[in-house]
Structures are given as C-alpha cells and as structure tokens.
Amino acid sequence: MLLLGYRRGSMQRKIILDNTDEAFALMGVLNTYASLIDDAFCVDTTLSNDGLLIKGDDLSGEQAEVIWRILLDIYHKEGSISERQVKQLILAASEDREKTYNPSNGEVICVSAKGRPVRPKTRGQALYTEAMAKNELTFAIGPAGTGKTFLAVAMAVRAFRAHEVSRIILTRPAVEAGENLGFLPGDLQSKVDPYMRPLYDALYELLGADQFARSIEKGTIEISPLAYMRGRTLDDSYIILDEAQNTSPEQMKMFLTRIGFHSKVVVTGDITQIDLPRERRSGLIDMKRILHGVAGISFVELDKNDVVRNPLVQKIIAAYEKDEEKNKKGPHMQKWKKSNG
C-alpha cells in the first residue's frame, strides 16, 4: 500500500513502502532508477527506514512523486520494473502530458507463449488497441518502434483464440528498401520470407513455434505478399496489412475491397519510410482524406512518445523530425499534412 506524507508547498515528500523488496525494485540496481529520476527532475531521492524521501521544489517534487507512484503500482502488478519503463515515464512527465500513462493499468490483450501478458505501454498504444477493438477497419500511422505491427498481431491472436474469427491473414507489399528482390537466392517463397520476417517474429512470440507451425499447416494463419490478395474475398478473418506506406493507390484500393463479412482489418505504416520510387505515390497518404467520415473506420497516429524500443530510437526519430523542419517537405509529407488539415 502507498501512503503519501507531505504538505503542499513543502520541500520534502515521503512515500511509505511495505518492505525492502519494494525499495530495491524501485531504486534499481546501484540506484540506477533513482538517479534517472533525480537527474530528470532536479530532486534528491533517498531511502529512509520506512520508505522514500523526495526532496525538491513543489513542481519537480510533484512530477517525481507521480513517477514513483506509478512505478510502485507497476511493481505490485508485474513484480518487476525495467529501465525502459522508467525512461518512458520520465519522458511523458517531462513533456507535460495531461496525465502520465500507467502501463500497468492497460488491458491485457493476450498472453504470450512464455506466459508474458501483452498490454499497451503508452497512451497512444492504448488508444490504438481501443480503436482496433471498436472498429472494423483501423489505420495506424507512426514511426518505427511504436508497436504498430506487434499490437495488431496481438489483437488478431486474441480474436482468433476467442473464436471471433476463423483465421488470421497477414500481408505486406514486397518492396525493397534499397535492395533488389531478384538478387536474393532461392525460390519465390524464400525470396518473399525476409519481407514477412517481422510478422513471423510477432507470431512466434505470441503463439510459440509449435502452435505457429501447426496453424500455418492448417491454413488458419496465412502470411503472404500483398499481390496474392488480388481476386480474393476475405470473410471471417482478422487481416493485417503491414508497411502500407509502400502500397500504390491501386494496391490499397484492391486490398480494402477484399474485406468480406465478419472480418476486421488493421492497416499499419510509417509515412517517413516510403521505399517506393519518387514518381510513385503512396497508397497510404490519401486514405484519411478519402475515407474521412466513413463509419467503422478509425485513424490512429502514433509518435516518438509511443516508441517502446531502445530509448535511443526516440532520440533518432526526434533528430530526424528536427531536420525535416529545417528543410522543405517532400511531396509525400506535404500531401499527408494537407490530408490531416
């Protein structure tokens, strides 16, 4: 149980802890987590006989207290705290969000093959999973590392396990990122497999290798290039189109018109990483303008604050965004900004 002992305007706040396990988990190895929080908010956090003492001015002390409170809640629910969680909470608080998101409060989407609960880790991811649950068609646009693909696959696995759909279909356009598909060795399937690897990885983690192999053999899970979708009607399925920024407008229309009865569709993409030739327009760019106001369709935009990979990825994305602001926007970005008003 968490008891806060401070007076508004005072220079010290106290968080009462139940035992030393809580203290060690919160502070981190060699006080790593405490150092991160202290440096971020210019406070001084120390251990007392019965809890944590936080010294700092009113604003910084309050921000640090919120972080510690959420971390303690995470520890109670998950039994551990990671450095990544600490850094994500610090980033959220530092950017003055209205309310720092507590990942331990997120709904568990499903449980992985190793028994790990899968849940949204940021506010943006929570909105994303809510959109997928409520809508027949969800578009998720955001940079690398924001969980677009993994959370979509997790929602598909949940729907499949609950018998809401009879199969999972995952597809991607086979577009090279600076390499030539024709130069890869092997037959067509072996050439296509590298493009599908992120989808394989997500399913391996959620289902385990054995169940994944059985599902592929039975046809209840299908992973194939986008070109293979032409001419099909996809009923009773959970369908994910990944890397949709690399579709042409014609391919996007073809894909969306494949949707059958009792199906859900998630389209993910990153408009900052379009691998199409410059003269070709991305099929993802105009979707919000074209489909605006259509019932059953949701658009979710994730950003660097939703990155759940190495914190360095957040810094890289921020650096690229800063550089783009200094230069003229390319035609893809101009059209995207225009379609978003």
Image (spheres, rainbow, N blue to C red):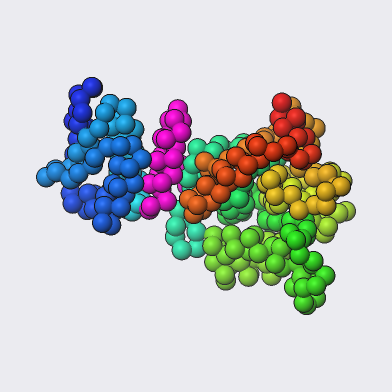
Does residue 199 appear in the picture of this structure?
yes
State the image coordinates of residue 202 (x, y, percent, origin top left): 59, 59
Does residue 265 appear in the picture of this structure?
no
Work out whether 256 lies above or below 288.
below
- In this view, the residue in front, 69 or 53, is 53
State the image coordinates of residue 119 (x, y, percent, origin top left): 48, 47
In the figure, is residue 197 to the left or right of 185? left
Q: Residue at x 56, y 43 (%)?
A: 318
State the image coordinates of residue 239 (x, y, percent, origin top left): 70, 51
Which residues are the magenta region? 82-109
State the image coordinates of residue 58 (x, y, percent, origin top left): 28, 26
Q: Where does the C terminus fall, quadrant-wise?
A: top right
Work out whether 200 lies above or below 147.
below
- In this view, the residue in front, 205 or 282, is 282
- Quarter of the image holding residue 102? top left
- In this view, the residue in front, 312 or 148, is 312
Question: Is 198 in the magenta?
Answer: no
Q: Residue at x 50, y 59 (%)?
A: 112
Q: Residue at x 14, y 43 (%)?
A: 48
Q: Where does the N terminus fall, quadrant-wise?
A: top left
Judged from this view, the residue extending furthest toward the front is 326
Q: Residue at x 46, y 63 (%)?
A: 114
Judged from this view, the residue extending furthest toward the top is 9
In the figure, is residue 319 to the left or right of 49? right
Question: Is 107 in the magenta?
Answer: yes
